[in-house]
Image (tube, rainbow, N blue to C red):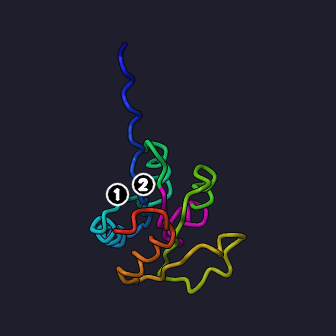
Amino acid sequence: MKSEPPDPKPAPPWILVVDDDLMVREMIETVLADSGWTVKLADGAASALKQVAEAPAPPALMICDVLMPKTDGLELTRRMLARVPDLKVVLISGHLEDTAWFPGDFNRLPLLRKPFKNQELLTAVREALPNEDQTR
């Protein structure tokens, strides 16, 4: 009798970064990758939705700019949560002071104000994903 191959390991958790500013995307990617995270980048909603649809597993966390052309970050978050209900989200913005005006539960999402420090970003990720490897 042939033995069954072991179940494949689940894909490691990954973070989707969505921002229309290339420099911001690349800075976030560098900080997170240097801390051991797998990071994928998207320049807007269409690219983000496509990456999630094509990925073998959904992202554990989405870091998303609020104010972007075409589809804003809140609408993208709404669409992503419809596809991935347990997705964690951290919003980022260089123009907003708070989330009090966001609809419904969106005002409970963490908001990082640009420019933020690397440590602020890493703290937000660790708080959003507390059950992930804390050595990152």
Please tell me which residue lies in front, 96 or 90: 90
In this rendering, the answer to whether 47 lies above or below 103 is above
Q: Quadrant of the N terminus?
A: top left
Locate residue 75, reporting x and y percent.
Answer: 61, 62
- Left or right placement of residue 104 versus residue 56 in this view: right
State the image quarter where residue 32 is shown.
bottom left
**Residue for point 38% across, 70% down:** 21
- Note whether 125 is above or below 87 in the view shown: below
Give the extent of the magenta segment.
60-76
Say if the magenta span includes residue 72: yes
Task: Write down the residue under mark 1.
Answer: 38
Residue 102 image-quadrant placement: bottom right
Crowding at mark 1 (Cα within 10 Å: few <14, some 14-19, many 20+): some
* Quadrant (top left, top right, bottom left, bottom right) of the C terminus: bottom left
79 or 110: nearer the viewer: 110
Q: Which amino acid, mark 1? A: Thr
Q: Secondary structure at mark 1?
A: strand
Q: Position of residue 112 (x, y in %)?
A: 49, 79
User: Above or below — where is 5 with respect to 22?
Assistant: above
Q: Are marks 1 and 2 in contact (CB under 8 Å)?
A: yes
Single out the residue that lies furthest toward the right.
Answer: 104
Q: Secondary structure at mark 2?
A: loop
Percent from the top left, x then y, of residue 125?
45, 70
